[in-house]
Amino acid sequence: MTNEMNEGGRAKYLNKKTNYLSIWKSKMSGKYDLIAGQRRFLACKKIGLDTISAIIREKMDDTDATIISLIENVHRADMSPLDKAKAYQSIYEKYKDYGKVVGETGVSISTIKKYLTLLNLAPAIQEKLTTNEGPAGIGTLSKLAETFNSPEEQEQVLEAIGGFKQSVQLEIIKQSGGNLENIQGLKDEALEGAFDTKMCKEGLCFTLPEDLKVQLKEMIESNNTKSLKEIVKKLK
């Protein structure tokens, strides 16, 4: 009951705002087709609203209707990454201009290009794409498709690095230079923590040479502040 009330309240709210349904009137058949706002329509229908705000579009063709529908759908959280990639591709093919795609969707050029690159992934990898990938996963798979052109190599790389977190996978792919032979060595480095990252604040990130580590430990244990200051000077 609570869900129905929430859904009904949302539907009424959306209907009052300027979230109009987009309806296309076909010149050929004279019929009306809903091209954007399917979820709002169903929500309003469910609570029994008699009228729903809508915009009737007559000056458009099949392609225009498809584009409007895609523009709305790309913002859905439950839309699969591959479907989003195909939607961006359709919108880009319509305008042939990334700037116009950005203007229509409100999505950055870099994000659009990342999704488009997913279309170059091996079919077997594309089939496994889900909404659980998240921005980091999309970035990693996009870089994989960009770095390795061969579907077979893409699958081999992903299988080899699949156990690492996304940030480490991305770093391995970047440093491989597109050479499959480099993956094992980079994987070994990753297992040793070479690509683990830490947040740095106030410029306190640095690599401490092994000999200074030993000296620093001895100074701390002996509480020798004078020698400790000398070590700090060497780090600057």
Image (spheres, rainbow, N blue to C red):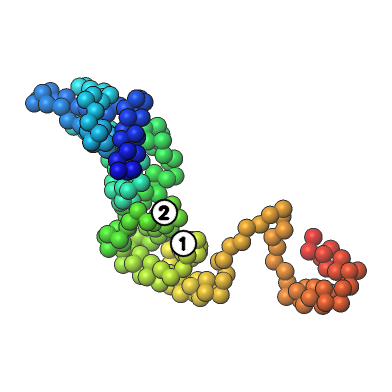
Query: Who's the residue at 42% across and 45% down the image?
Result: 111
Q: CA distance from mark 2 to mark 1?
A: 10 Å
User: Circle 2 sits on which residue?
Assistant: 134
Query: Crowding near pointer 1: few (<14 within 10 Å), some, many (20+)?
Result: some
Amino acid type, mark 2: Gly
Q: Is residue 217 left or right of residue 122?
A: right
* Callout 2–callout 1 Cβ contact below 8 Å: yes
* The one of 201 and 195 positioned closer to us in this rendering: 201
Outermost residue, front side: 1
Query: Who's the residue at 83% across and 68% down the image?
Result: 231
Query: Who's the residue at 52% across and 71% down the image?
Result: 190
* The one of 43 and 217 positioned closer to us in this rendering: 43
Query: Who's the residue at 10% across and 23% down the image?
Result: 30
Q: Is residue 225 visible?
A: yes
Q: Is residue 194 left or right of residue 164?
A: right
The image quarter containing residue 31 is top left
Q: Is residue 133 left or right of residue 174?
A: left
* The one of 227 and 101 positioned closer to us in this rendering: 227
Quarter of the rendering occupied by the N terminus: top left
- Place of residue 36 in the rendered image (x, y in percent of width and height, measured from the top left): 26, 33
Outermost residue, left side: 29
Q: Is residue 236 left or right of residue 143?
A: right
Amino acid type, mark 1: Gln
- Place of residue 42 in the rendered image (x, y in percent of width and height, measured from the top left): 23, 36
User: Circle 1 sits on which residue?
Assistant: 166
